[in-house]
Image (cartoon, grey):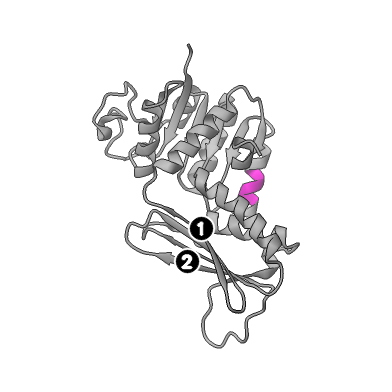
Amino acid sequence: MNKLKIAVCGASGKMGRALISAIRDDDVLTLAGALELPGNPYLGKDAGALLGFESGVNISSDIAFVADGAEVLIDFTRPEGTLRHLEACVSNKTAMVIGTTGFSDQEKEAIKHAAETIPVVMAPNMSVGVNVLLRLLKVASQALDSGYDIEIIEAHHKHKVDAPSGTALRMGEVIAESLGRNLSECAVYGREGDTGERDQKTIGFSAVRAGDIVGEHTAIFAGTGERIEITHKASDRSNFAVGAIRAAKFLSGKSKGLFDMEDVLGN
C-alpha cells in the first residue's frame, strides 16, 4: 500500500516533533520532508533524531525541495513563513494543512486564493476537543441569547506572540454568529481604567501569557444568579498533531478547496 507522503514545517520545534512522532506511529502516513529556517542547528540532521529514531529524512531549509517531495505539507509556524510555504505548495500542487494563527484579513484572502488551486485545511486549532467545544458554544449561545454576559479567557505559553489566540477569536466568531452579531463590532479586547458599565451585547476577551501553558480556553456565560463555563485545556501538543493528521488524510484525493476542521470531522 502506498503511504501518504507528509512534510512537516518547524520540524525541530515542539509541535514539529509531535507531528513527526504521530506520523511515525500512523500506518498510512510516511514522513517525506522536514523543514526548518536557515541557520537552524538541526539542518542536515535526521528529523527523527530528537525523538530517538531514524526517520530517513534530513531536515532542510529548501521549501521548494520539501514541498516537491510531499503530498501534504503541515504548517504550524508564523504567518510570514506560512505564506512563503503556501507559494511553494501552489507551485508544486502540494496540499496544505495550516494551523498557524495571527493572519491579517489580507493574508487570509491570499490563502483563499491559493485554495482555488490546491486543497487547504486551515483552522486556528486542530484539536478535536476544541472543535467539539465550538459545537457546544453554538448550542449555549442559542439557549443563552439574552440576560447573559459573555467573556472569553485564554492562556498560552510565554513565547506565543499573537493575542487573543486564533482559537479564542474563533470562539468569539461562533458565538457572535449564533447571536446574529458581528464580532468586529461587539468584541472588547481587555479592559483598563474607567470603562463604564458593561454592555451586555459585547463579547469580552482576556489573554494570559505565562510559563509553558500549552493552551487553555474558557467561554463564560454569566447571568444573574448563575454562570456557565465551557472550557478546554490542552496538556500537551499531541492532540493538535492528531487533528492535523486527520486533516492531512482528509485532503488526500482532493484537487482544491478551502476546508476547516468541521469539514474534516464530517459536519
Q: Nearer the viewer, residue 151 or 170?
A: 151
Q: Secondary structure at mark 1?
A: loop
Q: Determine the CA span between mark 2 and mark 1.
A: 8 Å
Which residue sits furthest left? 52
Question: What stretch of residues is rendered in magenta?
Answer: 106-110
**How far across and how far down the image is residue 120, in percent?**
60, 35
Return the residue at label 1.
165
Residue density around tag 1, few if under 14, some if 14–19, many if 20 or more, within 10 Å: many
**Main structural element of the magenta stretch: helix, strand or loop?**
helix
At label 1, which amino acid type do we have? Ser
* Residue 251 higher or lower than 190, as above or below: above
Which residue sits furthest front? 225
Quarter placement of the C terminus: top right
Is residue 85 among the parts visible in the rendering?
A: yes
Total numbered circles? 2
Q: Nearer the viewer, residue 18 or 32?
A: 18
Q: Is residue 50 left or right of residue 199?
A: left
Return the residue at label 2.
207
Residue density around tag 2, few if under 14, some if 14–19, many if 20 or more, within 10 Å: some
Q: Is residue 171 magenta?
A: no
**How far across and how far down the image is residue 245, in percent?**
48, 33
**How far across and how far down the image is residue 90, in percent?**
59, 30
Is residue 100 among the parts visible in the rendering?
A: no
Q: Secondary structure at mark 2?
A: strand
Q: Are marks 2 and 1 in contact (CB under 8 Å)?
A: yes
At label 2, which amino acid type do we have? Ala
Instruction: Write the residue at 44% across / 29% down.
Output: 7
Q: Is residue 108 magenta?
A: yes
Q: Nearer the viewer, residue 223 or 22?
A: 223
Chain-order first, disc 2 or disc 1: 1
**How far across and how far down the image is residue 118, in percent?**
63, 30
Q: Find residue 41 and report its image quarter.
A: top left
